[in-house]
Amino acid sequence: MVDTRGTDAGTARRIGRLSGGIILIGGILSALAYWLLPVAEVPLVGSVSAPELVGQVSDGGSFGLLRLVPWTVLLIILAGAWLLARSAGPGRPVLAVVALICALATGLAYLVPLGKVDQALDSAGADSLGIQATSLTGGGFWLALIGAVVALVGAVVELATGRSRR
């Protein structure tokens, strides 16, 4: 825990707003990555965004986890906006935990399919040709993970400093 007992009320409010802003930025980055940027790029074939990938996979499997991302990102954005707008309140720790859980779920929704693709490539012998799952990831994959980490950091900042503002 960060010891902020000696800080004044104005500093505590700024820290509270900062954590909400960090969460909000992380949610927006993940949302933009999901809907606008390619999550996978295959040389000479093309690229595909997350919604297109989810639409092409009928059986679900690990790619079905990507269906959760719009909901987790929406919750992250709403939690970040609420925390940014209100510098104090009893619901702040709950919203920080919601943002933390949703950020973890967003990251896992991208990392679990990556692991499955990597296993499939390894079993097919593609690794001997230098083809790895990470070489097929697009900018949307990485930006979504960065956004999830940013939101996670914001939630941790809120939880670590929230006690001093109450």
Image: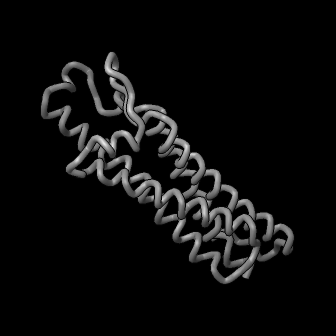
Residue beneath the point at 26% across and 44% down: 57
Residue beneath the point at 61% across and 71% down: 159
Image quadrant in which the C terminus is located: bottom right
**Quarter of the image where one finds residue 18:** bottom right
Q: Above or below — where is 59 with respect to 137?
A: below
Question: Is 123 situated left or right of 129 in this image?
Answer: left
Question: Is 61 situated left or right of 124 in this image?
Answer: right
Q: Above or below — where is 21 with respect to 36?
A: below
Residue 105 coordinates in the image, percent (x, y): 41, 59
Tell which of 41 and 153 is nearer to you: 41
Q: Above or below — where is 128 with respect to 151?
A: above
Residue 150 coordinates in the image, percent (x, y): 58, 51
Question: Is 41 situated left or right of 64 in this image?
Answer: right
Residue 104 coordinates in the image, percent (x, y): 44, 59
Query: Can you name the residue that lies furthest to the top here?
Result: 44
Residue beneath the point at 64% across and 56% down: 24
Residue beneath the point at 68% across and 68% down: 83
Give the color scheme: rainbow, by chain, secondary structure or one colour. one colour
Image quadrant in which the N terminus is located: bottom right
How many callouts does the rendering have?
Answer: 0
Tell which of 43 and 148 is nearer to you: 43
Residue 66 coordinates in the image, percent (x, y): 37, 51
